[in-house]
């Protein structure tokens, strides 16, 4: 169970997206990307579109692949035929754990994916684990330099989600006003507000 999305109140007349359709990135090596997502992680390649479009004042030739997640959404990647287009639209990703995509998994899926990552030879800093308290996260860097997180929520955090949601705006306001007191009671019980 995920603590994101539990108890979300919908205002009258509000139309919310139902789920993530896909998130897209540019790759310099589509086959390395395919091997990583399909062979190592286990996400099936669900579509490959080969395209030619007039975009931003020039004709662009590219492919667009989609790797399926459990809810039908996808991680998608572009690769351009022209190296100039590739350079323009595919800037290098900075190496930082604060720029990543996080995918929700249960304990069993996380264990299987973590074993596949290790079997493929990934080690620190390309693979690491963080215990956030509210979730356990397995991180791995894909062939494009993008960090992918496989996040398994803690059951207590899922149960406490309604209380966390009720305080979310107040906590944001408090932090932005300069009070940086830790409030992650799952990880820092001794320092939490």
Image (cartoon, grey):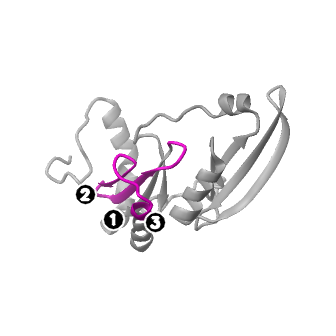
Label ID, residue 186: 2
Tag 3, which secondary structure? loop
Residue 81, located in which quarter of the rendered image? top right
Count neighbours of disc 1 (C-alpha within 10 A) and say few if under 14, some if 14 to 19, many if 20 or more.
Answer: many
Tell me which residue sits at (41%, 40%) in the image: 98
**CB of mark 3 within 8 Å of CB of mark 2?**
no
Foreground label between 3 and 2: 3
Expressed as whole percent of the image width and height from the top left, the position of residue 154 reads 33, 65
Q: Which mark is residue 31?
A: none
The one nearer the camera, 172 or 166, is 172
Question: Looking at the picture, how far across and down is residue 87, in whole percent?
Answer: 66, 29
Give the SS element for disc 1.
loop
Residue denoted by label 1? 154
Structural distance between the alpha carbons of marks 3 and 2: 19 Å
Q: Is residue 167 above or below residue 110?
A: above
2 or 1: tag closer to the N-terminus: 1
Residue under numbered circle 3:
105
Q: Nearer the viewer, residue 48 or 120?
A: 120
Q: Position of residue 188 (x, y in %)?
A: 20, 51
Identify the magenta region. Answer: 117-145
The answer to whether any part of residue 26 appears in the image is: no
- In this image, 51 relative to 182: left or right? right
Residue ranking furthest to the top? 57
The reply to whether the C-beta atoms of the residues labelled 3 and 1 are less than 8 Å apart is: no
Q: Residue 177: give x, y in percent of width and height.
A: 32, 29
Pick whichever of labels 3 and 1 is earlier in the sequence. Answer: 3
Can the viewer see residue 135 in this picture?
yes
């Amino acid at each position: 169970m995920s603590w994101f999305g539990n108890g979300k109140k919908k205002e009258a007349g509000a139309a919310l997206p139902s789920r993530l359709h896909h998130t897209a990135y540019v790759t310099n090596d589509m086959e390395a990307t395919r091997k990583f997502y399909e062979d190592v992680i286990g996400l099936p390649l669900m579509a490959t579109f080969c395209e030619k479009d007039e975009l931003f004042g020039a004709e662009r030739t590219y492919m667009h692949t989609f790797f399926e997640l459990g809810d039908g959404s996808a991680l998608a990647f572009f690769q351009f035929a022209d190296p100039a287009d590739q350079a323009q639209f595919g800037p290098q990703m900075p190496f930082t754990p604060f720029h990543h995509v996080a995918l929700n998994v249960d304990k069993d899926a996380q264990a299987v994916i973590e074993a596949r990552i290790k079997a493929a030879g990934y080690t620190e800093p390309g693979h690491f684990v963080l215990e956030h308290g509210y979730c356990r996260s397995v991180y791995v860097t894909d062939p494009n330099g993008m960090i992918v997180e496989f996040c398994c929520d803690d059951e207590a955090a899922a149960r406490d989600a309604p209380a966390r949601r009720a305080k979310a705006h107040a906590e944001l306001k408090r932090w932005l006003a300069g009070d940086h007191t830790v409030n992650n009671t799952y990880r820092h019980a001794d320092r939490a507000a």
